[in-house]
Amino acid sequence: MAKYDVNSPNAEEFINHEEILETIKFGRKNADNRKLILEILEKAKKAKGLSHREAFVLLSCNQKDLNDEIIKLAKELKLRFYGKRIVLFAPLYLSNYCINGCVYCPYHAKNKTIPRRKLTQDEIKKEVIALQDMGHKRLALETGEDPNMCPIDYVLESIKTIYSIHHKNGDIRRVNVNIAATTVENYKKLKDVGIGTYILFQETYHKENYEKLHPTGPKHNYNYHTEAMDRAQLGGIDDVGCGVLFGLNNYEYDFIGLMMHAEHLEARFGVGPHTISVPRIRPADDIDPDEFDNSIDDKIFKKIIACIRITAPYTGMIISTRESQETRKKVLDLGISQISGASKTSVGGYSENEDSSGSEQFDISDNRTLDEVVNWLIDMNHIPSFCTACYRAGRTGDRFMSLVKKGQIGNICAPNAMMTLQEYLMDYASEDTRRKGELLINKEIENIKREDIREKTKQWIKEIKNGRRDIRI
């Protein structure tokens, strides 16, 4: 039987089944242990992070006043490390060919009703121009797993195409990649073409259930999939993004597994995940989420997000358009630092009529335009950000985390957020969004603590209004 070892390269040792079961038992036993919970909260206030076991005690807490403290602390840590900014991105689906048998995804190989498609480079250009015309600067590349129809060379060529397109004042400045687990050599190739974050969702950390949910195809190999982030790090990609698909398995088990994965990356490579995503299962072609009996309600979902923020205070958190406008509103303050906007989950969905394609990976709950999302964020006193500066300045991995931990994010990210927002307001925004956005920028500039950066930001904002683009710290 494998033993728990946070530093091990073996998935069944750094995500150890027996350790997770013991942690669940410990957390449930101490759900009303006020002394222990208060001790953990005091430790959490130091913003050095928590162990997976401490994190689960907080998630298990039954005391209303202490749960209120958990929510309050999550909000404080979010504001402390990420401020008011919310980074915006969109997914771009290149292909939905797939040889896996994942029972929760309509791309599974046995689905004969979904139209299969792979974008040509010319079609990718049309998609990118459509995204640029909305104002997007950051994409998350998505594909099914099919080595013949969608080999690594196709992905690499597509990334080069995306970066090459400059339409009017638009360009894509960061391409994050969400593709199947692959080799160290292929991760090196992805790094060489300039990807941002490598994203891979675990789906579930419960090995037995994982194998049942992935009965056929290369994704069936639990260890190979779970160890992908290690191989990405070994291939030079130091910004990696983790996540589980809540609803597939018991949420307690997967929450602990997710926190153990973050601990492992920190222990072995000196830097935890750049982002953690929290998707919940959604309806899609031939997929009924009611068939999965592990769904979580908004109350639990909210607490999971708060506990992740407390446990991994320096990590970015993502919530997509899988969730409704109302749900996203409830959790933004708790720890979310990135959201998708105006997303399409079909191949060719931006430049064509998605409604007639039938190739969506899942249904969208938030169908607003990007301008409507930006306007909404401004109304809630968030700073919509299209910033990609750290990635292009080489501030990735431990260099980015070092800035966050030293509290320097406010002197870098806030000005960059405001400058990219000003670009958006000048080039893409509606009149109402532009008016509101400029009022917000004028107010938030005064909150920049360092006088030299504050004055430079004011000057740069003027230059952007006069036509200059892509100013960054």
Image: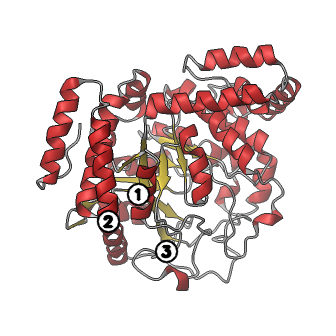
Using the numbered discs, state the Cα–Cα distance from disc 1 to disc 2 in whole angstroms: 9 Å
> Could you tell me which residue is drawn at 25 percent across and 65 percent down?
165
> Could you tell me which residue is drawn at 59 percent across and 45 percent down?
331
Label 1 Cα neighbours within 10 Å, binned few <14 / some 14-19 / many ≥20: many
Q: Toward which corner of the image does residue 153 lie, by quadrant?
A: bottom left
Please state which amino acid type lies under the numbered disc 1.
Asn
Q: Secondary structure at mark 1?
A: helix
Label 2 Cα neighbours within 10 Å, binned few <14 / some 14-19 / many ≥20: some
The first of marks 3 and 2 along the sequence is 3
Q: Position of residue 36 (x, y in %)?
A: 77, 15
Please state which amino acid type lies under the numbered disc 3.
Val
Using the numbered discs, state the Cα–Cα distance from disc 3 to disc 2 in whole angstroms: 28 Å
Residues marked 1 and 2 touching at CB (< 8 Å): yes
Residue 347 - label: 3
The first of marks 3 and 1 along the sequence is 3
Is any part of residue 429 visible from this angle? no
Viewer-nearest of labels 3 and 1?
Answer: 1
In this rendering, would 114 be left or right of 317?
right
Residue marked by disc 2: 430
- The residue lying furthest to the bottom in this view is 356
